[in-house]
Amino acid sequence: MKIRIINYLIVLLISIGTIYCADNKSNQQNVSPKIESLQDTYNTKFYYIKNFKDEEICIKYIFDFTKKEKGWIVILTNKDDVFFDDGIPYYKDRVSQIFSFFRHRESLENKGITVNFLENKSISFIKKKENNQTFLSSDFETLTVNTVQNFLDYAEKDESKKETENYTYILYNKDNQEKMKLKYHDKGAWFEVEIL
């Protein structure tokens, strides 16, 4: 009888432990990203994004956040990638993604954006140009850091944006869904980003 009760208690404890671990893991996976201020230097605002995952919801969250913040912005996915000494940032060996938005001091006008300092895997785009727009599509389902960086790189190198006052690049996934848009102004001098 004692052995039965002990076995029953062991099974009960294992069951409770399994349920707790599964629930805890589920809660961790459903944690939303959150951006926190880390440090302002004389020309850059540094932020840290908690719970970053290389997926569309986090990337959209970052780009939406930067629409409200003026100036040069750096968003770290690992706050230990940089340390500050007397207001000067020093980067350590990076093992995490860093998002950099290059702008004039009190401006929302993007001059350049870098979102992938780690490994850039080339993506092939199918291109179509029409009336001050370039439509790009590729074989991906959802945005990742690598996809975004390849799209930004293509638009940066392309000279079409310099031929007219305003020019737009639109990125489509393999299901022909519009995922991202870059709107260049002043013959390519600056651009806005929209993640759909």
Image (cartoon, rainbow, N blue to C red):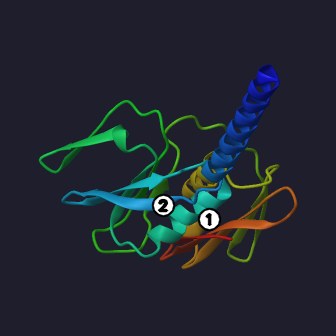
Q: Residue at x 82, y 49 (%)?
A: 139
Q: Residue furthest top?
A: 3
x, y percent for residue 40: 24, 59
Q: Is residue 94 visible?
A: yes
Badge 1 marks a residue whose secondary structure is helix
Residue 175 left/right relative to 50: right
Q: CA distance from mark 2 to mark 1?
A: 36 Å
x, y percent for residue 43: 23, 60
Q: Which residue is mark 1?
A: 160
In the depicted view, which residue is nearer to us: 88 or 61? 61
Does residue 43 lie above or below 97 as drawn? below
In the depicted view, which residue is nearer to us: 114 or 61? 61
In the depicted view, which residue is nearer to us: 70 or 77? 77
x, y percent for residue 35: 44, 61
Residue 175 left/right relative to 143: right
Q: Which mark is residue 86?
A: none
Q: Residue at x 76, y 37 (%)?
A: 15
Q: Residue furthest front?
A: 1
Q: Which residue is mark 2?
A: 34
Dot 2 or dot 1, earlier in sequence: 2
In the depicted view, which residue is nearer to us: 39 or 145? 39
Q: Label 2 crowding class (10 Å Cα cut-off): few <14, some 14-19, many 20+?
A: some
Q: Residue at x 47, y 53 (%)?
A: 50
